[in-house]
Amino acid sequence: MQKIVEVIGAKYIILYFIIINIIGFLAMGIDKWKAKNNRWRIPENTLFLITIFGGGIGTIAGMYLFRHKTQKPKFTIGLPAILILEIILIVYLSILK
């Protein structure tokens, strides 16, 4: 983990996570708007991919703020589970040094 931070740089990693979480948050809001206006929707797999690529905080915040997908266990359980697994992985990799 330390080598990754050294190669890429901590500020770029932080910037990446900020951007991917903003994208996740906006994706939930846009999809909710599209659902209400009978428009073409963002595929559920895309929302999960955003979460998998580090946007878990943003997608979960958007899910509850916009009250979108909150009735689907696939999302209410799946998104937090992905986020928790990612946190565990980061902690584990940090311990390995």
Image (cartoon, helix red, strand yellow):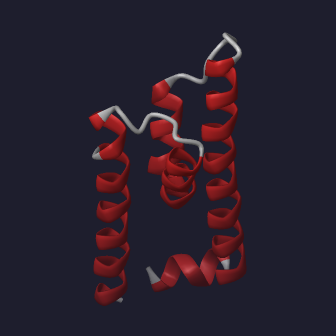
Viewer-nearest residue: 56 or 54: 56
Placement of 75 over or under 34, stated as above or below? below
Q: Quadrant of residue 14?
A: bottom right
For the point 69% across and 55% down, the residue is 22
For the point 67% across and 80% down, the residue is 9
Placement of 3 over or under 43, stated as above or below? below
Q: Is residue 3 left or right of residue 37?
A: left
Give the quadrant of the N terminus: bottom left
Q: Position of residue 48 (x, y in %)?
A: 45, 38
Viewer-nearest residue: 19 or 31: 31
Viewer-nearest residue: 21 or 15: 21
Q: Position of residue 81 (x, y in %)?
A: 29, 54
Q: Position of residue 64 (x, y in %)?
A: 50, 49
For the point 61% across and 20% down, the residue is 35
Q: Is residue 40 left or right of residue 59?
A: right
Q: Is residue 97 left or right of residue 44?
A: left
Placement of 34 over or under 62, stated as above or below? above
Q: Position of residue 26 (x, y in %)?
A: 69, 44
Count of marks placed on residues = 0
For the point 36% across and 89% down, the residue is 97
